[in-house]
Image (spheres, grey):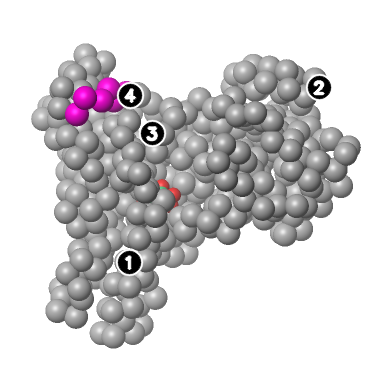
Amino acid sequence: MDTSATQQLFKQRFHATPAHFAFAPGRIEFIGNHTDYNGGLVMGAAVTEGITVAIAPREDGMIHLVSELGGLVKIPLGNYEPLEGEASWTNYPIGVTKIMSESGMSTPTGYNLAVTSTLPVGAGMSSSAAIELATAKALAALYGFETDTAGYARIGRRAENEFVGMPCGILDQGVSAFGRADHLVKIDCATERFATEPMPGEAHFWIFNSNKKHALVDSAYADRHRECHEALAQLRSDYPEARTLSEISQSQLDASHDRLDEVLYRRAAHIIGENDRVRAVQSALLNGDLQAVGAALSASHESSRHNFENSIPELDTLFELLKLQPTVYGARLTGGGFGGAVMALTNPGFGQAQADVIAAAYEAKHGIQPSIFHTRAGEGARLLNKAET
Ligand code: GLA
């Protein structure tokens, strides 16, 4: 792990040597879109890129935070309020500090924290979960806090839900925590059970960032969150035992079609269909059938487009262009949607030349250059030992 950029930033801003380094990866959402906060199934992959933090104690009761992108932010220990504007990135590490303190971590001193990233900006690969998990690992080492891997994922999610104010599920933090090289992370969000499954060696991930962002991504996400809960509330008149949308089957949904507003029907159909597609992908992976995996990925995108309406024309263009390539098994938007990136699962025959053709066609249509990124599944969040730095 190359920590030289983080070391340099830390030394330059704090004129001292870090006590600990921690790294946490970004993630690809592989299949299972918006299922996490609906008690469903989801599969993701940690990527090899992510966030590295360096930490050391300071004696004046202050927290000082610095990242490559922003200036120094100073916060008194114990005085935690979300910030807006340029300093809002500090809500992730401070949210984690607050949640860990509430969970029994004692903070006898303040700390200095420097943050660097190798994740592409704005590609929807969850740099927020990565900074949460890396900070949690670093704080645990600094203050002697202990929890298990699921505990770290839950701390990150709580920071995001309770401090940042984003009603996300456990996908991003769970994948960043449990990532494993050349494996997918599968999460049953109802029970919060985490497992890893091998990714066939001949499958490659390519990310095409549309470089287009819906102006109101956060409120659009919150709208979908609300609609899913409204759909459940309406369906519960027929199925009072259902605690989440994921406990309702497609045939039950169809039997209750008339009870639901049309939009809410489509939202529920997306969630229920995604759970079915996660199961289909899982058995296709067991059979080594990457064509069937790809078909489920592409069906997921179609459902996003028509049922959940969290795609945008730019993502649809990338999806259509990718689908035409014989070396692409399947493609879909990855993450919350309303902008961000399309992920393609390809065989090794897909290379930079094919990617460039797609980028050119996309640019000709939308006047925006996409960013392209070829990656593989990497390890989860961890404290870096001396030898690794
Ligand atoms: C974002 C959220 C996740 C998940 C996905 C959609 O990435 O942070 O919790 O809901 O969107 O599947």
Give the mark nearest the N terminus, 1 or 4. 1
Question: Label 1, label 4: how many angstroms apart (C-alpha)?
Answer: 32 Å
Q: Residue at x 74, y 38 (%)?
A: 74
Q: What amino acid type is highlighted by mark number 3?
A: Ala
**Percent x, y for residue 376?**
39, 28
**Mark 4 is on which residue type?**
Ser
Q: Which residue is mark 2?
A: 16
Q: CA distance from mark 4 to mark 3?
A: 8 Å
Q: CA distance from mark 1 to mark 2?
A: 49 Å
Q: Residue at x 39, y 55 (%)?
A: 219
Give me the residue at 42% from left, 37% from top: 125
Q: Which residues are magenta?
A: 366-372
Residue 173 position, x and y percent, is 51, 47
Q: Position of residue 122 (x, y in %)?
A: 41, 34
Name which residue type carries label 2. Ala
Residue at image mark 4 = 371
